[in-house]
Image: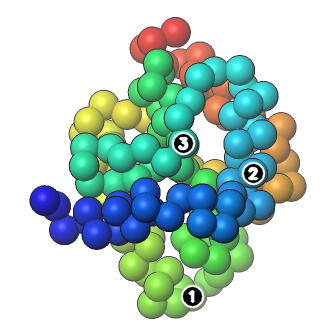
Amino acid sequence: YHADMKGINRVLRFPARNGLNTLELAGHAILEQSGFPYAEQQVIGGRFVVDALLPDHRIIVQWDGDFWHGNPSVYTALSPIQVVNVRRDKQCDAYAKQCGYTVLRFWESDVHSDPASVLARLCAAIANSDKT
């Protein structure tokens, strides 16, 4: 039992509590456009829940809310919750990379304002993966 399991259990227990938020819906649409199989809300190594996993390419996709993850183009100073989330994001990325995954993070503002560039970046990562 890892200390992070408390948060993982919360996410997995209530994934559809309020349905998908607008960021997750927009991200889901981008993943659908890619045409590659993916799974949402996956646990990686029993430590972290990721927004989406493209298992055939070992790519993790994270949809980062501008506020919750402290988008530096929006926030010059971080709140305490943003500091905690940014630290956890870095830990998750490092662990995922140790496990052989490529991690792609997309800001909420980019997903909503320029989904075509998000899709292009996703497709480029897929094309460059070892599993193509």
Amino acid type, mark 2: Leu
Earlier in the chain: of badge 2 and badge 3, it is 2
Amino acid type, mark 1: Ala
Residue 79 position within the rendered picture, expressed as x and y whole percent measured from the top left: 52, 90
Task: Give the farthest residue toward the top.
Answer: 132
Residue 110 shows up from this direction:
no
Decide: is 87 above or below 92.
below
Considering depth in this image, is 43 or 65 the residue closer to the camera?
43
Task: Report the disc number at residue 40.
Answer: 3
What's the residue at 50%, 64% (across, down)?
14
What's the residue at 78%, 28% (across, down)?
33
Considering depth in this image, is 86 or 57 the residue closer to the camera?
57
Residue 112 position within the rendered picture, expressed as x and y whole percent measured from the top left: 82, 56
Considering depth in this image, is 15 or 63 the residue closer to the camera?
15
Residue 26 shows up from this direction:
yes
Badge 1 marks a residue whose secondary structure is loop
Task: Report the disc number at residue 24.
Answer: none
Amino acid type, mark 3: Glu
Residue 32 position within the rendered picture, expressed as x and y whole percent measured from the top left: 73, 30
Task: Report the disc number at residue 77.
Answer: 1
Marks 1, 3: nearer the viewer: 3
Task: Report the disc number at residue 25.
Answer: 2
Badge 3 marks a residue whose secondary structure is strand
Left of 44 or right of it: where is 38? Answer: right
Earlier in the chain: of badge 1 and badge 2, it is 2
Considering depth in this image, is 15 or 65 the residue closer to the camera?
15
What's the residue at 69%, 34% (across, down)?
31
Badge 2 marks a residue whose secondary structure is helix
The colour mode here is rainbow
